[in-house]
Structures are given as structure tokens and as C-alpha cells.
Amino acid sequence: MRQALGLFSAFVLLAAAQPAGAAGGTITDQAVSLVYTSGHWSSAPNAWLYGTEASGANPLFRSGWWYRVVGVDTRESPFPPPDSEVYADGKLVATWNNVHGKGFSATETTWVFDEEGPSGGFSSEVLVSWGANPAHPIALFHLLDVDVAGSFSGDSAVLRGLNYIKITDGSSVVRYRGTGSQRHYLVAPYDNLYGGDVKRRLNDDLVDDFNNSGLPFGPGDFTGGMQFLTAEFGSWGTARVSVGVNQTRDYVRGQDPFLTQGPGPGLQFRTPSGPNVVIEWGMRRGTRVREELLSWGFPIHEVMGYNDFRNDGEGDIIARESASGVVKINWTPVTGAAPLPSNWRLGASHDFNGDGKADLLWFDTTSRKLAIWLMDGANKLGSRPPNPDQAVDANQVRVSGNFTDPPSVGSNVWRAVSWGDYGRGASGAPLGTPDVVWQNDVSRKVVIWNMDFAGHRVVGAFTSPDLCTSCGGGAIFGPR
């Protein structure tokens, strides 16, 4: 009777402690809906998720945020009802002008996404800012209480990657990820008295810090949390979590590590500022849901793409040091590989030998030849020259090859720049197909072809927006 007892005790608490003005609401993407109840903004943040289980069950019990002003507060506190909350276009934006009168503002932005199947989930971000006031570090905490497959007794969990927790019950899966500075997690069982050790610690009168404990877990009734420190940007900082239910894969090629907005691949643009400064779009099908400017310091690196090189469900950055030509995976130099001159470009990153880890395909712009590096994380295991190793009028070892339908975009100013599953089942395009991303060499506008498994275009449309104005119409370089 965990759900019944938990709900009863939660609503008794909320009736006593919930201030007026917390309306709650629902955000929806296709068949998936995330509900914040009127009692969400409290020490018991109820939330429901529908459309991710074939049975119609709700796998989500609680999801919410706490904070602590480091060096000032003597305990953690849940965010109070916001000054405003807007539920629209598959997104919640909640704002606080002066949280509990302490002098800092905050914004929560939460997106919901549908991945077909049924499957889907949500991503939630909190941004805090002191404005012109003296800055104090703020610790942000997220609580997640899930009942995988709609039941609460059979949950098991393992650490899949850096602050990436995979929770399973039978064939149902929940993926819980955290992105931000100084991430730490805590996992503990639920109990009917306190609602789990994670919730109890966030609501007690003590200063608590999560210590990366509690995994592996289960089987049992899972509760978990993530902790972040927002000191890296001085007077402001941010923390993000994403929760995906029954997604088909732990990692989606091109899913950038900074914009955890759903399961689809993002788009990466070059900027005039240099090879180490890029614009990233977090995409939901053909629509940009957020944009971020990313810059890495000295020595200057050319950021080339992302993929999962460690088979841990986490995206890893591929970069090359501009002066030396040294190739790096997550800023670690690749061992067993000589530096690459600038005429070698990254053509693709893919698992070419079936070991579950991404490899690198390079293209020599001078000789027009190809080369494959077989990789184990940041270690080059060996090379595998493709056969043929360049585009020639021969069939040699190629097993098959067909033109897409249509075979081109119809104009030589359009270039195929990337691919990924951007359709996610939209507009009749099946889930899991490699959709083609085109960019116009003159206007820099972007079009996505949603494809079927036979290479036929189901639908083609401009992205929304169709141009990266903030990067000066920069060229797309990933995912690849």
C-alpha cells in the first residue's frame, strides 16, 4: 500500500503547509503528459507522468527541487510556490523573483517529450542568479521518486555513467541523468514514514550533502536524488536533470552532453569566434527547444563532435588541439595515435566493429581517402582502412548501396551535413530511422528529411528556426 499511504501523508502535509498561488498544471508532447499537482511546490513535490507505459500506468510519484545557500543556510529548503508559472508548448516556465526573501532569483524550465513506443519523459533545469548582489554558492538538489512500470516493489538500479542512473523493473526502464557542476547522487529505499531517506534528509533541519552512495540498488522501492553546486559562474549557475522512460537506447548518437532535452540528437554549429566556440541546439524533432553557447579554453581546440566512446551511455567530446593536431576524447589525448594534420577531417563516429563503443572515420581532404580508427574510449586499438578507401567507380567490397528517394535535394547549394533520428516517429516517419540534415551553403538554412527504413523521404521540412542567427549562419558540424 505504498502509493496509498504515501499519497495520504503527502496531502495531509500539503494541506497544512501549501501557500496560496500554486496552481500546478500539465505540459504535453503528443501522447506524453507531465502533471504538476497544485501541491507540487512543497516538501512533497507530487508529479505524474502519463503515456510512457503500454499499460497506461504512471511511473512517476515525485519530482522536485530544493536549494541551500552555502555558508548561510543551516538546512535545505524546497522551492516555494513560484511568482509565475506558465504551462504551454510542451514546456513549463516557473519564475521566482526573490526566493524566500534571500536575494536571489530562480527559473525552472521543464520540457516533456514523446519518443513513441510508448516511451518518453521530461527534462528539468533550474537557473539561479544573484543579479548585482554579492554571490554565494547555491547547492541545488533534485528529488526523484519513481515506480517503474507503475509498481513500487521491484525496482533495481545501477550507475550507468557519470551521474547516470538506470532503473529497471522487468522490461520497463527509467533513465535518470544529472548535468551540472560538482554532481553527486544519493539512492535510498522509500519508506511510508518519511517517504524515503532522500526526501527525509532534504526536509530535516540539518545540512546534508549527497555522497554518491546507494548503488547498486534493489530490488525494492527506489527513491533518488542529484546534488549540484552553482558556484562555477560566480553570481549565477544552473543544474539539469532528465528522466526518460522506456527509451530504446541508453545513448542516442548526437545527444549532446550539455543539453539534456529529451532523447533526440542535437545540432552543433560553428561560430566565427573560433574552432573552440560552438552553438548547440537542443532539438525536439524539427524544433529547437533551447540553445547554448559553449567555449573551451586554451590551448585552442577544434570541437568536432560527440559520441559514446566508453559504452557508458554518456556522450564524449571529440576535439583536436589546433596547434599540435593531437586528437582528444573528453580532453584526454588519444593513445596509440599520431597527431592528425588539418587536412584530415572527422567524417563520422560510429561503432564499426560491433564492440558497443564508437570509432572514428577520418577523411583526407587532399587525397580524398578514408581511414577508420577502432577505439576503446580514448585508446586507439588499431586502424581499418575501408575497402574501397575512397569514392571510385568500383564495387569491390561494398555489399550494397542505393540512392535515397529522392536522390538529392535538387540544387548543388545544398549539402548533406549530418544525420540522426530527428523524426522520432513524427509525420509518419518510423522510430529509429537515420534522418538526413541538409544545410544551404549560401543561406545556411537547415532542412531535415525524415526517412523510412527503405531510404525514402517521408517528409522534408525546414527546422524551426531554420537558421542559426546567433552563430552568424555558421556551418553544422555535428552530430557526425
Image (cartoon, rainbow, N blue to C red):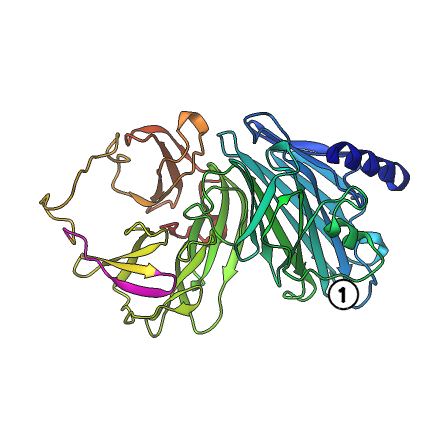
Circle 1 packing at 10 Å, graded few (<14), some (14-19), many (20+), is: some
Q: Is residue 384 magenta?
A: yes
In front: 146, or 408? Answer: 146
Give 84 or 326, whichever is nearer the viewer: 326
Query: Residue 423 at what x, y percent from top left?
Result: 43, 34
Please state if 417 lies on the left or on the right of 260 as rendered. Answer: left
Residue 409 versus residue 325 in the image, above or below: above
Residue under the point 42% across and 70% down: 300
User: Residue 30: which quarter of the image?
Assistant: top right
Residue 98: in sight, yes or no?
Answer: no
Counting labels gives 1
Q: Quadrant of residue 27?
A: top right
Query: Is 426 displayed left or right of 337 in the figure?
Result: right
411, 437: nearer the viewer: 437
Quick check: is 323 in the magenta stretch?
no
**Where is residue 146 drawn, in percent x and y?**
65, 40
Residue situated in front as seen by the camera: 392 or 376: 376
Identify the residue under disc 1: 70
The residue drawn where x is 25% and y is 35% is 408
Hey, which residue is sitting farthest right in the picture? 16
The image position of residue 25, as x and y in percent, is 72, 32
Helix, strand or loop under label 1: loop
Magenta-colored span: 376-388
> What residue occupies the far front of the structure in this picture?
219
**Residue 332: horizontal and vertical position, in percent?**
42, 69
Q: Residue at x 52, y 56 (%)?
A: 293
Can residue 386 be seen in the rendering of this structure?
yes
Q: Is residue 244 left or right of residue 14?
A: left
Does 296 appear above or below 226? below
> Seen in the image, is 159 located left or right of residue 332?
right
Q: Amino acid at mark 1?
A: Val
